[in-house]
Amino acid sequence: MVRNRGCGEISESDIGHDLTLCGWVFRRRDHGGLIFIDLRDRSGILQVVFSPDVSGDAHARAHDLRSEYVISVSGKIRTRPGGTENPNMPTGMVEMYVDELKVLNESSLLPFTIEDAADASESLRLKHRYLDLRRPEMQRNLIIRHKVTKVIRDYLDERGFIEIETPMLTKSTPEGARDYLVPSRLNPGHFYALPQSPQIFKQILMVSGFEKYFQIVKCFRDEDLRADRQPEFTQVDLEMSFADMKDVVGNIEEMLKRLFKDVIDVDLEIPIERLSFHESIERFGNDKPDLRFGLELKDMADLSEKGTFKVFLDAVHSGGRVKAINGKGMANLSRKEIDTLTEEAVSFGAKGLAWIKVKSAGGGGFESPIAKFFPEEILRQMAARLDIEEGDLMLFVADKGKVVHDVLSRMRLELGKKLNLIKPGYRFAWITDFPLLEWNDEEGRFEAMHHPFTSPMDEDIERMLTGDVNNKNLLGSLRAKAYDIVLNGYEIGGGSIRIHRRDLQKKMFEVLRISDEEARIKFGFLLDALEFGAPPHGGIALGLDRLVMIMVGASSIRDVIAFPKTQKACCLMSGTPSPVEPKQLKELSIKIDLS
Ligand code: ASP
């Protein structure tokens, strides 16, 4: 098929040339004598004109063209007549006058139009994904995704990283989510797990001496889905030998800098700012802070103690917290609006929301059912701590620390959006100094905050090796050589320096109450490998889907994945998952019990 160029590439330098173009009928306008078609292919859109003066035959047949017919047109590129140019379109100065039209295929009536602002429901879009992906916005998203992986591969290759594939049919990995299982026909009753990450294999590759590994790899986690999760997702996974945190962090920063410049022409400032886990929780209430706006959480425990409000005093005296944020410019909310805000706080887990309206900053302007419990001077100090100006609203939550932080971090985000405080741009941060372990109240034991192969900080190693596995205070105080990277309020990656000593790994399992036997069954091959000269090593994995989502400005990762799944983990286009033939189950020695 002869096709000289892409529709979107045609420019004034093509004027006077005879070209042949192919594509889909995007829009069609019948202006009596002339018929205009916006012809679309991957490269963009060009206006093509059918005139009876140029070709009576092509003009006559153009009447029958409908949306999404596939056509080929030949003709001369001309400048658009004065006054009909469209400066908003890259090809808006030119058009093709068609002297030959071929209809390559017809199209049925569409379930929705292929316009950029898709007004169809997402489920309809997902069911007809082949059409949804024709939308220029989706094409752009996937093309940017392609460029992102290309730049990453080039960068890592130049830095001596080697891409090595690890198995998809494997054993359960310790990332803490549920596994997707695959039955083994040849080993009845035995199952593979799809990898939650290549964690163990990449560590083994370090033991094997590859020194720098990476892989752009599908991972699988059977979790309840949220807006920014998918059951299968892609990680940029890497691991380095003889590396400390500085090396891993430095490589990722350089890579991101190059990525943002080459793909979306944004200059990132590196080094990226660092916050300790503790500081992030204290200031923003979570460990993936959105730094594009303020409204930081402020501790009010000391000032609470200078008043007589029982809810605050009880929280402080029972080891809880009282913290507040500034509801900027919200002092004029009605009682009903404040009730709605309170309901929101309750839905986030708070028992209630205390508030003080600040009508005039100077003094005397505090309006609140709780104002009477505090001397005026204390109210003023509270206001000063929150950078309150006239017309602002102080919002307080008092409870256990975790609840206070959860609720206020979510309220902060809601208010940031509602009050339009979020500045455009890309705000990265590294979160460091994580605790090594996290207490699980339900199970009455510690869990690894990242995964059980994460190394404690050097200064904590001896304390851990010699410490009593029942000493909760000691274990709770250990810190990890772990780091997360956060962008605009999303965790886009995380990693750690690993344990490479057999004795320390053994102790880690003891602390986590994983028996020798269980450790052997689950990760015996890694433990064996650690016996044979494992170099110090560490790495990281970035979530490619989230990263691309933020780079293209999409609001869902489904918009940067060609064939994503729904919240219920279904593919609406292919109808996956689906029942299978009884014969297949029999071969796999599987019986279904839906009771
Ligand atoms: N395997 C980890 C994860 O998937 C990343 C890492 O530690 O390198 O979160």
Image (spheres, rainbow, N blue to C red):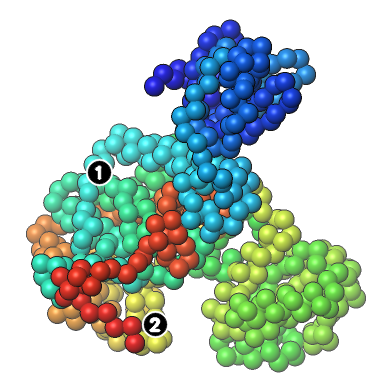
Question: Which residue is under mark 2?
Answer: 440
Mark 1 CB within 8 Å of ligand 1: no
Numbered mark located on residue 258 in the image: none
Residue 458: x and y in percent read 30, 63
Q: From what the image shows, is residue 142 above or below residue 102?
A: below
Considering depth in this image, is 210 or 183 the residue closer to the camera?
183
User: Which residue occupies 57% across, 54% down?
Assistant: 555
The kind of secondary structure element at disc 2 is strand
* Amino acid type at mark 1: Glu
Tell me if residue 122 can be seen: yes
User: Which residue occupies 37% across, 37% down?
Assistant: 150
The kind of secondary structure element at disc 1 is strand
Residue 385: x and y in percent read 72, 68
What number of labels is visible? 2
Instruction: Please identify the quarter of the rendering in which residue 363 is found.
Output: bottom right
User: Which residue occupies 14% across, 62% down?
Assistant: 530
Neighbour tally class for label 1: few under 14, some 14-19, many 20 plus, Cα within 10 Å: some
* Amino acid type at mark 2: Asn
Instruction: Please identify the quarter of the rendering in which residue 328 is found.
Output: bottom right
Question: Which residue is under mark 1?
Answer: 163
Residue 396: x and y in percent read 70, 77
The N terminus sits in image quarter: top left
Q: Nearer the viewer, mark 1 or mark 2?
A: 1
Neighbour tally class for label 2: few under 14, some 14-19, many 20 plus, Cα within 10 Å: few
What is the spatial separation of the Cα atoms under label 1 and label 2, in whole angstroms? 37 Å
Residue 388: x and y in percent read 78, 65
Tell me if residue 478 can be seen: no
